[in-house]
Image (cartoon, rainbow, N blue to C red):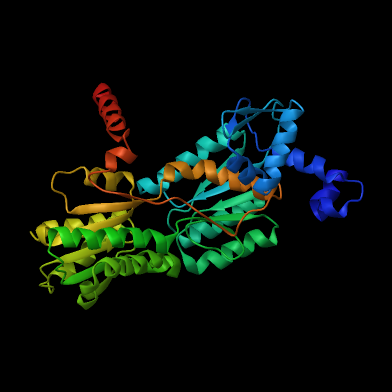
């Protein structure tokens, strides 16, 4: 009964509650598996308490024999983690056509199993209608929390309203939904990273000459993902002010390889630009543009950059003399663990910011093996399996 009262009102309003004990209990829940070692910063982030308070609590619990300090800034709990309530989470995947969404789904499934959480999965199939039907199904299932990965901005308010009316908290991946906790790209920052690199690339390879900048859009995703392209333009102009005089062309590629290929193919029939920078909203759109330049025999006149550093993009980065000069990584293979952490924080009423951004890094032909050293091993394993099946 006390726990229910505390959850509804907060410990500060319960006159029988001892705040220091409540805070110590919050801290101990940060240690989720036996033998796990955490830094002060990690403990603070997980339990939602200020670092100064966490430091004092850790010091006190260490003196009481409940915490071990390992080295300079690592801590380990001597208390075996108690089982949290078993939650049922609903996950509506974006689709299975592209590697990025596949990796997000796989990482979330792994993380749910590791945490002992039941994960109910459905596939939105890049369809607004399917996404709405899936939201209805999640509400009928009475999931404790919904994780939504769908692309269409126009139906985002409709989907969010379904969960809100059912009193189901929601996390929205990459596309904002009203009232939901946002998890995903810092779109403008990701664009800036790519744009700055493009400006440097032009200085080094084209003596600062740019005739045209082509940007592949995904209009139905709305304005926030488009900030990747806005950031890209700003980044280019920061490093290469002369690019402000270049023609800027927006083409609709719908975030897919095929439509992007067709859009750029049509554009090249009328464009005579000799030096063209191409920015895609994601890797499939960027690769579609590259294929159009290759088909037209004009690949040497383009430099293409993507977003996501997904598997198909990384494969192209490893091609000899590719004009796919880089991609900004979002690390979808890490989404799952972080999404589960944010979900548990929400369900346990711990503080969560309205937007949780992923880390971004620039991946180029030079650095791709540094960030993804296991790609080649996985490719060899897949090739070996295929040979055995034959």
Q: Give the image quarter of residue 380.
A: top left
Residue plotted at (51% across, 57% down): 131
Residue plotted at (58% across, 30% down): 37
Confirm whether residue 170 shows in the render: yes
- Above or below, 231 relative to 115: below
Give the percent coordinates (x, y) of residue 53. Answer: 71, 45
Give the percent coordinates (x, y) of residue 314. Answer: 28, 44
- Above or below, 269 relative to 144: below
Q: Give the image quarter of residue 245.
A: bottom left
The reply, left or right, for residue 9 in relation to residue 206 is right
The reply, left or right, for residue 383 in relation to residue 158 is left
Give the percent coordinates (x, y) of residue 269. Answer: 12, 71
Which quadrant, please, contains the C terminus? top left
Residue lying at the far bottom in this picture: please name it: 245
- Above or below, 274 relative to 163: below
Residue plotted at (31% across, 43% down): 311
Q: Give the image quarter of residue 282.
A: bottom left
The reply, left or right, for residue 209 in relation to residue 374 is left
Front in this rendered view, residue 295 or 302: 302
Q: How many marks?
A: 0
Residue lying at the far right in this picture: please name it: 16
Front in this rendered view, residue 280 or 130: 280
Front in this rendered view, residue 222 or 158: 222
């Amino acid at each position: 009964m006390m726990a229910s009262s505390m959850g509804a009102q907060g410990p500060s309003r319960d006159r029988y509650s001892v705040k220091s004990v409540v805070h110590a209990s919050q801290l101990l829940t940060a240690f989720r598996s036996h033998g796990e070692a955490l830094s002060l910063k990690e403990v603070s982030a997980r339990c939602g308490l200020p670092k100064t308070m966490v430091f004092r609590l850790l010091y006190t619990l260490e003196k009481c024999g409940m915490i071990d300090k390992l080295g300079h800034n690592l801590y380990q709990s001597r208390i075996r983690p108690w089982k949290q309530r078993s939650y049922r989470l609903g996950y509506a995947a974006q689709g299975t056509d592209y590697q990025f969404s596949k990796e997000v789904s796989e990482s979330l499934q792994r993380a749910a199993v590791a945490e002992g959480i039941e994960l109910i999965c459905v596939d939105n199939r890049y369809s607004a209608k399917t996404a709405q039907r899936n939201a209805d199904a999640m509400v009928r299932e009475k999931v404790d929390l919904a994780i939504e990965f769908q692309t269409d901005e126009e139906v985002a308010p409709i989907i969010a309203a379904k969960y809100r009316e059912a009193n189901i908290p929601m996390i929205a991946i990459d596309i904002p939904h009203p009232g939901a906790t946002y998890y995903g790209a810092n779109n403008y920052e990701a664009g800036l990273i790519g744009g700055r690199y493009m400006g440097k690339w032009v200085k080094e390879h084209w003596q600062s000459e740019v005739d045209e900048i082509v940007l592949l859009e995904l209009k139905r995703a709305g304005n926030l993902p488009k900030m990747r392209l806005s950031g890209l333009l700003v980044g280019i102009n920061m490093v290469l002010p002369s690019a402000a005089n270049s023609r800027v062309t927006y083409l609709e590629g719908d975030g897919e390889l095929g439509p992007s290929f067709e859009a750029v193919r049509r554009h090249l029939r009328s464009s005579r630009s000799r030096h063209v920078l191409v920015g895609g909203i994601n890797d499939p759109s960027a690769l579609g543009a590259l294929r159009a330049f290759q088909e037209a025999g004009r690949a040497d006149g383009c430099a293409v950059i993507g977003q996501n550093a997904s598997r198909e993009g990384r494969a192209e980065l490893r091609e000899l003399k590719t004009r796919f000069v880089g991609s900004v990584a979002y690390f979808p293979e890490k989404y799952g663990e972080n999404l589960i952490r944010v979900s548990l924080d929400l369900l346990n009423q711990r503080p969560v910011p309205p937007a949780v951004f992923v880390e971004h890094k620039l991946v180029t032909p030079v650095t791709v093996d540094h960030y993804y050293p296991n790609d080649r091993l996985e490719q060899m394993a897949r090739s070996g399996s295929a040979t055995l099946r034959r």
